[in-house]
Image (cartoon, grey):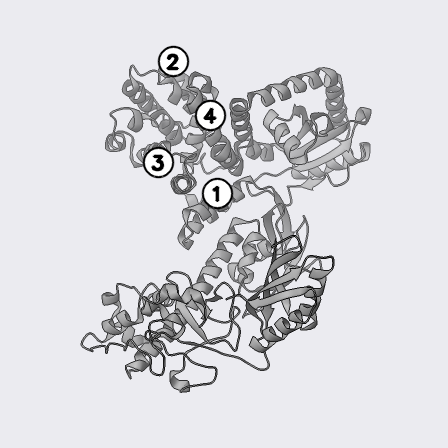
Amino acid sequence: MRQYELVDKVRAYNPAVNEDLLNAAYVYAMQKHGAQFRASGDPYFSHPLQVASLLTDLKLDDATIAAALLHDTIEDTDATRGEIERRFGKEIAALVDGLTKIKKLDLVSKEAKQAENLRKLLLAIVEDVRVLLVKLADRLHNMRTLNFMRAEKRARIAQETLDIYAPLAGRMGMQDMREELEDLSFHELQPAHYETIVRRLEGLKRRNGALIAEIENDLRERLQERGIEATVKGREKRPYSIFKKTEQKQVAFEQLSDIFAFRVLVNKVEDCYRALGLVHTKWPLVPGRFKDYISTPKQNDYRSLHTTVIGPGHQRVELQIRTEEMHRIAEFGIAAHALYKENKAGDSLRLEGESRAFAWLRRTMAMLAEGDNPEEFLEHTKLELFQDQVFCFTPKGKLITLPRGANAIDFAYAVHTDVGNTAVGCRVNGRTTPLVSELYNGDEVAIITAKQQTPPAAWETLVVTGRARAAIRRATRSAVRAQYAGLGQRIIERAFERLEKTYSPDALQGALKRLARKSVDDVLTAVGRGEMRSQDVVRAVFPDFKLEQSSHAAAGLDETWFGLQGGQNLRFKLPGGGDPAKAAIPVRGLMGDLPVRFAEGGAVPGDRIVAILTPGEAITIYPIQSQALADFEDRPELWLDVRWDLEAARAERYPARIQVVSINEPGTLAQIAQVIAETDGNIDNLAMQRRSFDMTEMIIDLEVYDLKHLLAIIDGLRARKVVSEVQRVI
């Protein structure tokens, strides 16, 4: 393509074309690429020229066409951004620089790197969406000439195209480009499947050619009779689309009902519904196959009426009815907006208002400010890219678009993060339903909230939207951090009490620099996690105060009590004992407000207990007779004084483990389970191992109220004839 031909293509849709700009960019790029050649043997300049030509089909502005001509100059020649800025201005230089950065990104690398590179890609796009348009055209031309590259490079580029660029084109509403990118990738990655589908399509076309022409003519004539000006054109599904449908629905090629579809293009929106009425009067509707994307457009701005009818010869026929303007947006997507035609491409705020696709991109990028790590961002973005949609409504009629398979929890987070975090129930179409209920098109959803509610961590596995999943993770992290901060405060308060000092947040505020923490909350959390010792905090707050060295022997305890070296720095508390003001940290259980877990084998009220602060995890409760404590006897800084905090009105269960050796005969397990059930115990886990031909050993994890309750279960088991031996495992 010569200079004047390119200029003429732009002038065809933009009479005010800046001919000098395009000519200058053409000559500059051709000179810079000089004697460079592509793998196909063609001059390298043929590539940017073809990219520019593809963008003229999208009717883009002069700056974008010029950037397309120049897009490889910084990367592949001695050109610099400064030089391009001097010659062509800041706008074009910024576009070329953005494209240069994108070219260096590896989007099929390891997950973390892939995620970070996807962030960079989307950041470049959101600054100026024309960067994406040039990149997509660049990728399309590269895919068309992919056969000249090495096999391993072809596979990498095709996979990257299928994973990232084709879905992005779809999200931007550029359906034709998305479909071609998918087919080219599919042909490279799975050539056998591709060829098989193409052969079957050709055979189907030969058999049904006359029928397709008959339907086209019939539709056209009937629309003309009703005074509806329309263009009717038959089209077949693309190979990759057919492949995906056969894979997802687990059906054979012959079972697909919508391989052939017909587009009916009319002049006005009301003609769409008139044509739809005509079609449904002529042919029976296939139930469940009607979709109105005019009243509820897709997030990529796609609007159309879809219906499937039983046509001539009892053949299922899919129809897409839309206006010419809707069809232009369906083909060109975000590039179809008048923004570019008025040379205001930098007005991203206006573009966001006009384009739902760009608004989606903005919302996706807003996640960057919410602190999600790269892997979460990648997961969210891929979910958003690949999911189909359902349309639901709030009680006030606001439309909420969700991925297919989403539930009421996803809906709540789509309304607002605070609504999701405080959701406790929902009503779908006026009926109370579980929050995990899947939603369908047209559902009206009312979310019931409670101020004190926080989202359970298990919700993360139940939702399908990245937004909900990220919000639940943040809320869970905040809740855990609050638990650690609470624990840290209690530990520091007791450290201050031992020195007869009064704790206050202001006291810590002045020591933040010495502790290398940004806030008091960071200090409390670090202490609660075991990442910082309370003694270090005290030293930072009172630098001149000399800490008394703790005695290596606890008063009243034997040097070798329970095999520990004098109970180093420990003060064991029995329930209810000691001075309440200086009592040990109260422990309520797994459901309390502290990050508490029990050691393997558990502990129950009535046991003497001690806690070990495991750095970065939680405090672990051990019975004082646990053999595992010997591993910590030389780490006194990890030991915490704890006591049971029991409420008579609140019956809470605690973990305990027992070993049962029983006779191996039918009904033994039933008898053991019966004893536990009759004494109001609960079996949490059970493992069985054959000790000999006639004896079986069981390890049973129980949930009991206290030590008395556990002993009652053990006594009940020992009374059974089938039980040979029972003992507690600690």
Q: Earlier in the sequence, mark 4 or mark 3?
A: 3
Q: Is residue 489 left or right of residue 263?
A: left
Task: Check disc 2 and report its element: helix, strand or loop.
Answer: loop
Q: Earlier in the sequence, mark 1 or mark 4?
A: 4
Q: Which mark is residue 98?
A: 3
The residue carrying pointer 2 sits among few (fewer than 14), some (14 to 19) or many (20 or more) residues within 10 Å by Cα, namely: few
Q: Earlier in the sequence, mark 2 or mark 3?
A: 2
Q: Is residue 610 left or right of residue 248?
A: left
The amino acid type, in three-letter code, at marker 2 is Asp
| Farthest-out residue, front | 693
The amino acid type, in three-letter code, at marker 3 is Gly
Task: Check disc 1 and report its element: helix, strand or loop.
Answer: helix
Q: Earlier in the sequence, mark 1 or mark 3?
A: 3
In the picture of the structure, the residue carrying the numbered disc 2 is: 42
Quarter of the rendering containing residue 341: top left
Count of residue discs: 4
In the picture of the structure, the residue carrying the numbered disc 1 is: 358
Q: Position of residue 114 (x, y in %)?
A: 41, 39
What residue do we see at 42% from left, 24% from top?
Answer: 153
Quarter of the rendering containing residue 449: bottom right
